[in-house]
Image (tube, rainbow, N blue to C red):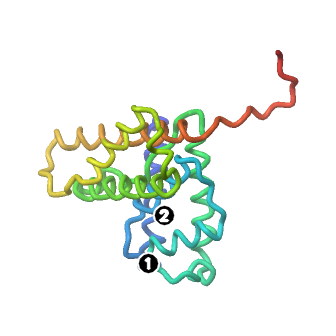
Amino acid sequence: MSETDTSGAARAAEFERWANVFTAHKAFSHPSELHGALCGRLAAGSRIEEPEWLAMVCEHMGLAEDAAEESDDLAPFMNRAYEQTLGLLKSADMSFHPLLPDDDYAIEQRLEALVSWVRGFLEGMALSAGESLGQAPDEIRELIEDMVAISQLSEEEEADDESEQQLLEITEYIRLGALAVFTEFNAPEPPKSDSPTLH
């Protein structure tokens, strides 16, 4: 199995874990949308303290505010998800991917998940970046316009090989777009080294 296959399998398993948590808590929203909202907030430069993140989780899932405290699994799962997502966005190897179902799902379900993720991302980004989005470079503004168009796609599209290919291309565009926004709004962290810097 190649590295791509294993990372694809790992991403599929991660989506299933999120989906199982959402099902167990009878959430009425889509896991991809919450992941998108988190990525949008992080990409726009925000960092969320644990209580605010868990409140955001409960709100998105349609749960009572104290649901995370009362559940054994929700807070640990979501805190791990937060750390993991931030780590992947920061990662130099560009291994970040939106949380989406794999191709075992019908194309309509995958498109619905992608649209949900993009809507979440735009919402999270708007919450965090606010006015500064207006001062973003042209390519970031164009990217946001493209994302707005993608967020309005309908899952009524007829499924064929061409739409499979288009879905793959849009997903990759969104993935790289999220990383571009993250790079724009987050200063690179200094390398962790004890050696003196040369001037």
Asked whether disc 2 touches disc 1, contact meaning CB atoms under 8 Å apart, the reply is: no
Secondary structure under the numbered disc 1 in the rendered image = loop
Q: Quadrant of residue 69?
A: bottom right
Look at the picture and state if 38 lies above or below 63: above
- Residue 13 visible in the current orientation: no
The spot of residue 187 in percent (x, y) is: 63, 37
Look at the picture and state if 47 lies above or below 176: below
Taking the spot 81% from the left edge, 31% from the top edge, the residue there is: 193
Q: Nearer the viewer, residue 156 or 143?
A: 143
Q: Is residue 41 toward the left or the right of residue 12 in the image?
A: right
The spot of residue 177 in percent (x, y) is: 42, 39
Q: Is residue 64 toward the left or the right of residue 145 in the image?
A: right
Q: Where residue 71 is drawn, which disc sits there?
A: none
Pointer 2 residue: 17
Crowd rating for badge 1 (residues with CA inside 10 Å; few <14, some 14–19, many 20+): some
> Tag 1: residue type?
Gly
- Residue 157 visible in the current orientation: yes
Pointer 1 residue: 62
